[in-house]
Amino acid sequence: MAVYKTAQREALLGFLRCNSDKSFTVREIEQGMKNSGSGVTVPGESTLYRLIKELVESGEVRRTVMGNSRTFVYQIVNGSDCGHHLHMKCKVCGKLCHMDEQESREIMEKIRSNDLFEVDSSTILIGKCSVCKD
């Protein structure tokens, strides 16, 4: 399927890149884009769902579940760098944090050296972020 670089797609990617440390529901993305003051026409909700689906399928955006709900949140992937480290996901707000590459390597090697398990870099550790743990 052809990927068209429409103004709406580029505006969505721009918003997600500017907020790469956060994850959002589609409605939060829509509201955030409206409040950004960028002057770009914000896509409608159905267009956002279609664009997000395409970005998830292409690997540019990661989809995770917020807490124990059925709500999905979306966050931009940091390019090819994202495949070389572990991630930590907040079970309260859904924020996805990138673990330092060296720390990730040490954890994966420690587990591997004990012949317990082989962890790959797509592993997500679940816990609470610094904001939600209090």
Image (spheres, grey):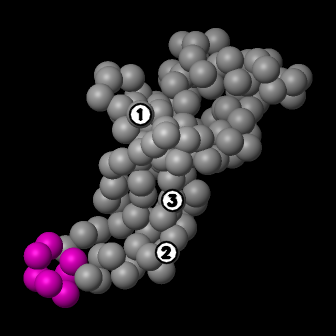
Whether label 3 touches label 1, CB < 8 Å: no
Q: Residue furthest front?
A: 134
Give residue 43's position: percent from left, percent from top: 68, 17
**What residue sits right under mark 1 in the picture?**
92
Q: Amino acid at mark 2?
A: Glu
Marks 3 and 1 sit apart, C-alpha to C-alpha, by: 17 Å
Q: Residue at x 14, y 73 (%)?
A: 117
For this rendering, which residue is in front, 63 or 132? 132
Q: Evaluate whether residue 98 shows in this view.
A: yes
Answer above or below: position of 110 versus 99.
below
Q: Amino acid at mark 3?
A: His
Give residue 109's position: percent from left, percent from top: 29, 83
Stretch in magenta = 111-117
Q: Residue at x 71, y 36 (%)?
A: 15
**What residue sits right under mark 3 in the picture?**
98
Q: Can residue 115 be found in the magenta stretch?
A: yes
Marks 2 and 1 sit apart, C-alpha to C-alpha, by: 24 Å
Q: Which of disc 1 and disc 2 is earlier in sequence? A: 1
Give residue 51's position: percent from left, percent from top: 55, 28
**What residue sits right under mark 2 in the picture?**
101
